[in-house]
Amino acid sequence: MELTLGEFARRARERLDPPVWDFLEGGAGEERTLAANTAAFDRIRLRPSVLRGAGRPGTGVKILGRTWAAPVAVAPVAFHTLAHPEGELATVRGIGAAAKVPVVVSTFAGRTFEELAAETAVPLWLQVYCLRDRALTRHLVERAERAGFEALVLTVDTPRLGRRLRDLRNDFRLPPGVTPANLEGDGFSSPSAHSRAAFDPDLDWSVVDWLRSVSALPILLKGILTGADARRAAEAGVDGIVVSNHGGRQLDGVPGTLDVLPEVSAAVGGRVPILLDGGVRRGRDVLAALALGADAVLVGRPVLHGLAAGGADGVRNVFTVLLDELTDAMAQAGLRTLADVGPELVGQAPVRRR
Ligand code: FNR
């Protein structure tokens, strides 16, 4: 039985073809940013408070007017069908069995928005790549909105796909049967070749207004890494931001996400919710992110590890482990609710004079 997310990763690696494992696991360039994401969490040491009568901790949070069972959602990851034939159908079933938290569905999902919405009661959000073909992009957004999706996550760190050396060496192609189910007839097999053709390298801030003009859903920007961009996003009227370096898959050499979180949080000043992804692998990592200014986190690869290890049950087990760890860390640190989490959990306590 797997008791940590690392153990699920090992199990997944045993089961997946090496080029598929490399596609899921790898980053861009020398994978320095990929390593920086987990290293930033590894450096954190927590400062517990004792004798606080914290009882049984509650992990609920409110984000964009909705209560989540825990501040942990599923990051958008393309082609869950690479990890398990049922793909995103199994993912939403597994998440639903573990906790009511959102699943962000990729533009490149292996299952259709409509079949996912019919399968689950968990909140579904759509990750949007604003493609060169705006009519197609608009059509995807409208379909998701009609299917009951609750928010749009516009990915802004991908003018083109990053240089992923593992995939270049493997000449990685999607196996037969793995397709972007919501982009039918796309003639798609090499993700990097497709991205060169479909992604729009000329996007600017006007894309936010464009997206708002085609949908009434809340819009979050994913891929913010500086205070300046975070401020600009808040001023552009977005409903939230996701601090992300795309799991180290885009510009290699950018910092780990946890390292830029204080700067982003200071710039946002509480105007909009901040989510963070990249390297969250333990319950205590969730607390670290919240202490440094996030309202919630997303997890990417561990969900695929669960899928590969055991389909919907595997996803449920991954989330159950993560949330059990979170509850345990809260109890041990003297935290009754997540509202009790502040910077003093990870840094020097402020000096108080009597
Ligand atoms: C991704 N990610 C991603 N992001 C996005 O906006 N749209 C997408 O289609 C994808 N696809 C994708 C595929 C794979 C295989 C991976 C590993 C990642 C990035 C993802 O949303 C997220 O930012 C990172 O995966 C978070 O880091 P961890 O949790 O995987 O460390």
Image (cartoon, rainbow, N blue to C red):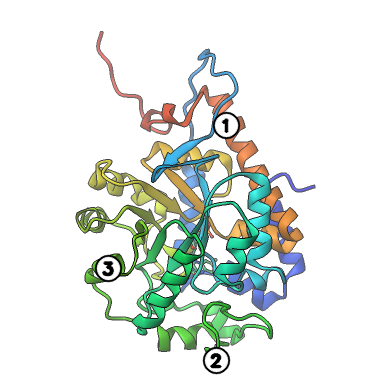
Residue name at image x 58 percent, y 18 percent: 55
The secondary element bearing badge 3 is classed as: helix
* Residue at which label 3 appears: 213
Q: Disc 1 beta carbon < 8 A from ligand 1?
A: no
Q: Nearer the viewer, residue 58 or 96?
A: 96
Q: Nearer the viewer, residue 284 or 296?
A: 296
Separation of residues labelled 3 and 1 (CA atoms): 43 Å
Q: Disc 2 beta carbon < 8 A from ligand 1?
A: no
Name, please, the residue furthest toward the front.
146
The secondary element bearing badge 1 is classed as: helix
The secondary element bearing badge 2 is classed as: loop
Q: Amino acid at mark 2?
A: Gly
* Residue at which label 1 appears: 329
Tell us which disc is closer to us: 3 or 2: 3
Q: Quadrant of residue 33?
A: bottom left
Estimate how packed mark 1 is, as few (under 14), some (14 to 19) or many (20 or more) residues with alpha carbons within 10 Å. many
How far across and how far down the image is residue 275, in percent? 41, 50
Residue name at image x 41 percent, y 55 percent: 256
* Residue 315 as seen in the image, left or right of residue 141: right
Q: Amino acid at mark 1?
A: Ala
Residue name at image x 66 percent, y 45 percent: 98
State which quarter of the image contains the C terminus.
top left
* Residue at which label 2 appears: 187
Tell us which disc is closer to us: 2 or 1: 2
Name, please, the residue furthest toward the top.
354
